[in-house]
Image: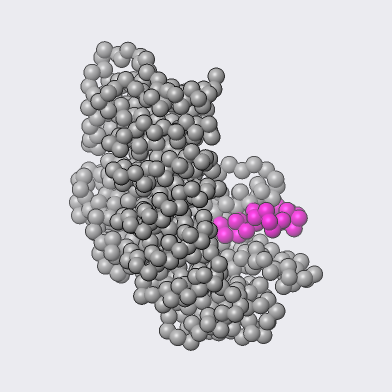
Amino acid sequence: MRLSPSVVVFFISTMGFIMTRCVPDNKIKSTKIAINLSNKEVREILNLQDKQDITSLYRYFKDENPTNRYLSVMAFGSIQDPSAVDSLYPMLNDPVMEVRSAAAYAIGQSGNIKATDKLIAAFSSRDTLDINNEFNSNILEAVGKLGAASDLKALATIKTYRTTDTLLLMGQSRAIYRMALRGITSDEGTSRMVDLLYTFGVPEKVRLYAAHYLARAKNISLELYKVRLIEIFGKDPNPNIRMALATAFGKSQDLDFLTALKAKYATEQDYRVMCNILRSFGSYPYTEVRNLLLEKTKDQNIHIASVASDGILQKGIVEDVPEYMRFDTLTFPWQVRAKMNAAVLNHTALYFTKSKTAFTERILGNYKNSSSDYEKAAYINAISYDPFNFQQLINLYKTEKSHLLRIAALEGLGAILTNPNFFRAFGNGYGQVKASMLNTFLDAIQQGDSGEISVVSEILKNPDLQWREWIKDVNALEPALKKLSLPRDQEAYNGLMSAVSYLKEETFKPTQPNYNHPIDWEVINLLSDSTIAAVKTSKGLIRMVLYKNLAPGSVANFVTLADSNFYNQKVFHRVVPNFVIQTGCPRGDGYGGLDYSIRTEVPMEYYDDEGYVGMASAGPHTEGTQLFITHSPTPHLDGKYTIFGKVVEGMDVVNKITVGDYINEIIIVK
């Protein structure tokens, strides 16, 4: 029977159900968790996790050693099998608090929404000395991952926690945030998060999740909280709070918040906060932010200038096109010039064809004079803002040998198809143009390149483009699957299968690679708990500590690659200002890897600070060689992407890196 919200509120707000625990086995006496990666049983459990051998892991649930129970239960947080919850429920009664906490976390990670009542029933109020607070905190967060709207109301109306109840407040804030990521919000939830953000003495990590809730939650109103939020934004010394609020103010589109954003624009010293302010300007009338955006396109910080250029590209007006054209006659970084070139085409009237054709030739001149493929790709993207350039893009696809540039041309064609002016541009002739593009897409699939297949697959499964009416022989796409190498090309394989399933009106379930790359324990043997990776880049040195106890498979993989010089000369192919820098792709375009895969490792570790080092992936258990480093907290990645290290020196270098920078070498200081 489903517990009513009123009952839930009553019990949880008074620290609820007094759980009647099963009497523990008298043989189980030890309560200490001690993870020693040299221990044979510890390695066996981690190997079973790596193989996702669920049945064998269950046997350790009754082990006398609490470390073995803890690790075997925690393994399910990474495996994320919804069917495992029935076996995990009894572990909520384990006599060791860390094991109970791991069980709550693992159940939350399972995705099984039927588990909510069991979690609530396990919430403990027996202890007055905060012994159970970690356990209760994990239960609250797990309910946030699995619960319904009624559970959110119960969570949000708990106001009995003191500012010193750090773990309980953390569990509550994470729970409300997790609900928001799932699209479940309420006025009570918003009110509680504002209270947590505003109340003096609330721990900073709790405030961080509250601020990120305001930044990411959809369909919430901040009208009642404007005065308090503007006060915090203006005075808070923590840039992580300010940057989240800057994003929240943009979502609101309230002119009072715009006034606050403008005030902070004048004084803000942290480039990451400034990037978020500039992005939020995009939510307001162009005339209100025009001069501020144009000013920052000239900023010395390339991230700020790039984001400001994005704002012009998206929000500009035809009257300002002459101003945008000036960027092609002055000296600007290509990251700015290319976007301002695009802005000219995007905001020039559709039928000013002569002017646009002439300016396209100037863009192609920039393309030909570019010093790198990344710069060239930016100019290819720029010409895609004029639908009439479709043939130019088709020609570039056919003539370029670089996969990076061919992919840019395909992405440009996809952008033209979704351009609001597409049908206006071609009128009754749109069908011939679309057919020409489709032939290019089908040719790209038959080429068998993983990156090109991935891009085209996304285009073909866009329901707005109605490809089902155009592609009669869907089966003709499937032979391309045989040209892909698994597990290396798992992303392209799943992408194409997803497109085929969409076109056939069938349900698609992504496949995961089979177990193929064991943890190399000989590598782990050589590492200490404080092993450092010294990453020498074209912009300077980054030092990061490796988390071998949290992610041994990922750390062993990274160290092996580094020691073999794999990362030498690898380019940072993806940089998103105030989000991540990403590297490790053998192709340099984000679609490459080696002929193996490793598994996702997500124990209780959180992206709640800058400088975390994570494994890039195309879905659970598809990791390989690519990694990223965060510019700032990214809690929406929690529990999804492996964290295997953290920057301890050189965040200033991380913040300087742009697309095209590269790694010289990585030295593992063991």
Viewer-side residue, 624 vs 232: 232
Q: Residue at x 33, y 64 (%)?
A: 270
Indicate whether 293 appears above or below 277.
Answer: below
- Percent of width and height locating residue 356: 63, 81
> In the displayed structure, does residue 226 sit left or right of residue 510?
left
Q: Quadrant of the N terminus?
A: top right
Viewer-side residue, 528 vs 307: 307
- Percent of width and height locating residue 609: 32, 51
Instruction: Report the number of discs.
Output: 0
Main secondary structure type of the part rendered in magenta = helix
Q: Residue at x 38, y 61 (%)?
A: 273
Outermost residue on the right side: it is 428
Q: Residue at x 29, y 22 (%)?
A: 127
> In the displayed structure, does residue 135 sit left or right of residue 111?
left
Observer able to see residue 246: yes
> In the displayed structure, does residue 399 sit left or right of residue 216?
right
Indicate whether 430 appears above or below 181.
Answer: below
User: Is residue 662 inside the magenta stretch?
Assistant: no
Magenta region, residue range: 454-477
Observer able to see residue 575: no
Viewer-side residue, 424 vs 173: 173
- Where, by quadrant of the figure, is residue 167 drawn? top left
- Percent of width and height locating residue 33: 24, 30
